[in-house]
Image (tube, grey):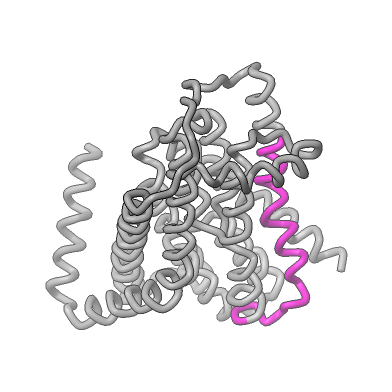
Amino acid sequence: MRKTISVICVFVFILFILLFPEVTVHAAADGLLLWYTSLLPTLLPLGILSNILIASGYFHYITKYLYAVIKPFYPISRAGVFPLFAGLLFGFPLGSKITADLVSSHEMSKAEGNILICICNNLSPVFLNGYVFCTCLKRPDLLPVGIVSLYLPPLFYGFFGLLRCKKGTVFSPDTKKPTSRSQLNFKIIDAGILNGFETLTKLGGYIMFFSILTAFIRMFPFGSELTQTLCAGILEVTTGIHKTSAIRSFPLRFGLALGFTSFGGICGLAQTSSMIKDAGLSTTHYLRMKTVFAISSVCIGMLLLSGM
């Protein structure tokens, strides 16, 4: 049954492409333009650098000092500090990519990796400030409320999840980390560059695909404005947040924007799945926790907004 539904969906998608080639071309161009102008120059250098740091072992020098600062407050491993800070600062999807690379290189266990991809794979503070609160909501003064609402649930979950992992009551390392020496050569740099371009090319394909799908959905309006906004936000985060601008009630706009941002959209789920599949991390667990975080973020945000 599931296979039949998948075949039907693919057939319908191809049919729409053939029937509406102009819409397809414009949507694909918009998606690729977003990828080329925003994601590629922002994430590619960071992706290449993280690949080189992990492959060379030099990231240990960075985590050495960060771990000493965060260890008394947060029960994370020394290797886990790297994706935690990189994911929170630079945002999705670097958090999941770096975590998966560390699991694949046996720097951390799958158990810790499954927790970390839920903590550090969020949209960055720069995106929140520039796009969500300044451009769409036009309320930059609410940025602190947004940061608390969006980052508190995953960090809270991570604290207790990592604490259990560290104590070994539920989780245990899958493999022992092999001993290695830090080194840097052109072979590692070349591999890091190729890996970075491969990762960003995948992201570009997913963004183009979901841009086309979103354009097709917009062609066939159904239900109320709220229903259309919910469908768009669940499918792709930036489109959903943009459509909240048409909703008159600001508390409702604010809550929806927080929910879409926290969840990340099905497009974000597909991109994350492509980042973590080779490391054996759980997409199902990631989806379940992102749904919980989205609901929690909306509740916290509305509570804080009502108290202002």
The front one of 307 and 101 is: 101
Q: Is residue 157 located in the magenta-colored stretch of the structure? A: yes
Location of residue 43 with respect to 161 vertically, above or below: below
- Residue pictured at 53% horizontal, 46% vertical: 58
The front one of 33 and 179 is: 179
Specify the principal SS of the magenta part. Answer: helix
- Residue pictured at 18% horizontal, 60% vertical: 12
Location of residue 50 with respect to 173 vertically, above or below: below
Q: Quadrant of residue 303?
A: bottom right
Considering every residue shown, the one lying at the far top of the view is 169
Location of residue 251 with respect to 10 vertically, above or below: below
Residue 308 image position (x, y, % from top left)? 86, 69
Q: Quadrant of residue 214?
A: bottom left
Location of residue 249 with respect to 5 vertically, above or below: below
Residue 124 image position (x, y, % from top left)? 59, 63
Residue 185 image position (x, y, % from top left)? 38, 50
Quadrant of the frame with the N terminus: top left
Magenta segment: 135-159
Confirm whether residue 206 shows in the render. no
- Residue pictured at 46% horizontal, 35% vertical: 103
- Residue pictured at 20% horizontal, 40% vertical: 3
